[in-house]
Amino acid sequence: MSAPVKENPVNKYLRMERMPSIWCPGCGIGTTVNCFARALDESKIPLDNLAVVSGIGCTGRVAGYLNVDSFHTTHGRAIPFATGLQLARPDLKVVVYSGDGDLSAIGGNHFIHAARRNADLLVVMVNNFTYGMTGGQVTPTTFRPAIASTTPYGAFEQTFNMPMLADSCGAVYVARWTAYHVKQLAKSMAEAINKRGFRFIEIAAPCPTLYLRRNKLGEGLDEMKFYKEKSVIRNGVDTREVALDYRKEITVGKFVDRERATLEDAMDQRYKEALGAKYVPYVSPGAAKSQA
Amino acid sequence: MSTQVSAGKHTVEQVEAVTIRFVGDSGDGMQLTGTEFTRASALAGNDLATFPDYPAEIRAPAGSLYGVSGYQVNFGAREIHTPGDAPDVLVAMNPAALKTNLADLKPGGMLLVNAGAFTAGNLEKAGYKTNPLEDAALTQTYKLVPVDMNKLTETALAGSGLSSKEVARCKNYFALGLMYWLYSRPIEPQLEAIQRKFAKKPEFASANAAVFKAGHAYGETSEVFYQRYQVPASKLAAGTYRNVTGNFATALGFATVARLTGRQVFLGSYPITPATEILQEMSYFKEHGVVTYQAEDEIAGIGSAIGAAFGGALACTSTSGPGLALKTEMMGLAVITELPLVIVNVQRGGPSTGMPTKTEQADLLMALFGRHGEAPMPVLAAQSPADCFWSAIEAMKIATKWMTPVLLLTDGYLGNGSEPFKVPSLDELPKLQVKYQTVPNYADGAQYMPYLRDDKLVRPWAVPGTPGLEHRVGGLEKDSLSGMVSYDGMNHERMVKTRAQKIRNVVEDVPDVETFGAASGDLLLVSWGGTFGAVRGAAEELQARGKAVSHVHLRWLNPLPKNLGEVLRRFKKVFVPEVNDGQLAFYLRGKFPGVDPLQFNRINGKPIKIGELVGKVLEVL
């Protein structure tokens, strides 16, 4: 008698009929999705109240594998779309899930303004240090002097320190983990989902097909070993000290966790102060009451 | 038609319609003066149309030719279609204003100038070698009335304690007071308006009121004028009217949609001339279920609106040409996801930054075709400032009924221009119902298929959070039923053709064009958008001269009205006047083979003039 097959607890959060995924063997994106599903399980938020928005690129495909309402927007524009959705539907938890190219390059302006406004969004950025889907071009997070298809002689531009950028623009929650730190990442995601305001989680993840291969850094597993060896957890450290560098120590942890009025709350408060009883705050009908 | 009656020491001539243009330095308060005089005309029951024409610079160097700001108003006892061709009265506050506007004044027209501003310095800045007011030709051609408004303003404010700079800024109220006297307007409403406007600065309220009264008294006592004028009330249908600009009317239309549906109206937008007022005006409507969001750029403006639409809001975004260019990728996203959205483009002179404060109709082809891939969407164009209200509601109705983005074209002339708007009662407004999908629609209620269409090819609108209806849409091509990403070539072809057919089906909501004049004849004038007033005015004049000329006006550019081809072919000639280089003419040639319109194109940043158009038509008849 064989034991009954136990279903993986995260299956219900995933569109199993869409598997296998488009991601390469050894890619770190799927690992982060697994952590996200576990975070959903742990956070106990009703799935009906969750919407996931992604941009374009390998990580942009995450929305398609989650069994929730989701929207796959154009390149770089996940944050503005999500901000509009959130303002129209304050009853929803809106998560933006995208990559380093999408969020820090073409979507960089939206990123800093959403953090400044404290838009009520959880932004998960899988940082694989390259544009995967277009074939491995240099991004604002590619280290000097890593090789990319558009920097065949090595990258030469200064990179973004994304946690510092988010922090300095006013994000209320900033954390960084790697694809190796599955437990901490899932816990961090669960914590961030239940918080309000602009929350940012960066995840360093291997891209074996392009970034690792081109830089002769081995397979996905080698990179996981590298993350294990080189990562140092420093919770609460000043984000000015967490910049990453090529093959150097990786500072991970929760760097920022504070409270600040969200975009919607600040808007409501201002209108109430200025207009008094004349202001009628918008009450989201919510999906359940949306019947015409 | 004019009649003379005697009133006190001055006779009062009754006139049917008058066009006045106020021109001065951009710091002279001409927009305010024009707006205030317009309000007085509206209160007097006149029909009217206005055309503010101002420089792009907030404060160009004083006295310069390019810093001249103008405001033209045409008001009358009859129906007024346009702000008027040539002004009957030109109020010029300095030499630069005179130089840039004199050529437009009707021969014999009244030329009221602030003689005090004709100093050597100002004359030089305007490029005058001698003082034009001393030119005999000027007094022979026009009724010149030089008034030293600087000095008279100073006299009126002697002992007021205001600085000389503050005193100088009151002189526009002198001009306004004088015009009130000349056109027999009661002054009390204006005095009340001054009190309201300067409620927080009583010293300016009393100063401006004093100068306004001084201007009014100057007309009565100076012996310069031998008569006054009166424009009787227009026979407008009974009702409550308010004077509205096109941009305000657009904002009001969207706010009304929130009221009609009980749903949130979401405007995601970014400031851009001449569309900014839509965002500004809607920012005030906080008790109407309106949410405004000033995004960090044009793309985020439309992006947030599409996000709101996905969430179930009635979404819109407003912009002008350069902003529309930035929004095009996102417009494609709204097309492929088939979400309701209204994009307002208040057209301005282009390309690029072009002429931001000047009007143009040159975005028609961009509106129709300016997206990558096959991305058709309904295109509607408002025909007058008040029509912007109705167009905004109509565009939102089509967007939600057909699950599609809709492009609403207005232009700088409509957006900034104004006319009386008959405030409708709630039952005069269109019925607007929003329906969300709330139950699974496939496999006996077991599944939700976001692209399962009804018989009109419209897909359902399910909002996030509806239990059992979890779904995913996005910019990648989708399976024609499930909405899952699909790279199947035949599925793509089917989807492209289905989306196109759905937009063609919208024609059932597009009214047939009505022919103004005989159903057939020598020439048919065809207009679209903001040229309605000028072209209708030209058609009236040509018909009055016995010409076999008719007029059709297009509000819907896509789909075109069903009967348009047939109507075009009933005339020997088709004539298309446009404020662009011939975009509608090009479109009609493609849509209706054999129809080859004659063109009249003005691209000088100003609306078409009736007289000029009449002349062009007479040349080809």
Image (cartoon, coloured by chain):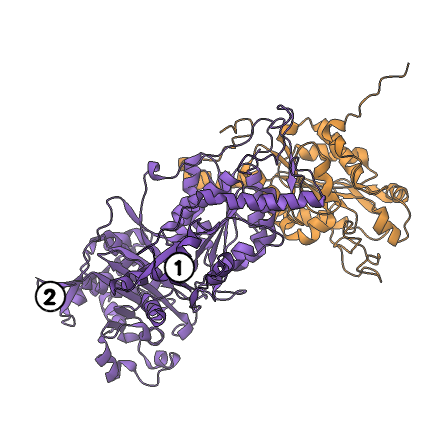
Chain colours: A orange, B purple
Q: Residue at x 12, y 63 (%)?
A: B3
Residue B239 in view: yes
Q: Few, some or many C-alpha atoms within 10 Å of disc 2 (few <14, some 14-19, many ≥20)?
A: some
Residue B588 or residue A286, whichever sits in front = B588
Q: Which residue lies most toward the top here?
A: A1
Q: Disc 2 vs disc 1: Cβ atoms closer than 8 Å?
A: no
Q: Which residue is mark 1?
A: B526
Identify the amino acid type marked 1: Val
Comparing B456 with A191, the one in front is: B456
Snapshot quadrant of residue A34: top right
Q: Which mark is residue B346?
A: none
- Kind of residue sitting beneath label 2: His
- Chain where mark 2 sits: B
Q: Quadrant of residue B136?
A: bottom left
Q: Which residue is mark 2?
A: B10
**B527 in relation to B309, above or below:** below
On the picture, is A68 further left or further right than B544?
Answer: right
Dot 1 lies on which element?
Answer: strand
Q: Position of residue B469 (x, y in %)?
A: 62, 29
Outermost residue toward the bottom? Answer: B129
Q: Is residue B466 left or right of B146 when viewed as pictured?
A: right
Q: Position of residue B478 (x, y in %)?
A: 67, 41
Residue B134: image x %, image y %?
25, 83
Left or right, B15 with reference to A14: left
Q: Secondary structure at mark 2?
A: strand
State whether residue B477 appears in this view.
no
| Circle 1 chain | B
The residue shown at (34%, 54%) is B515
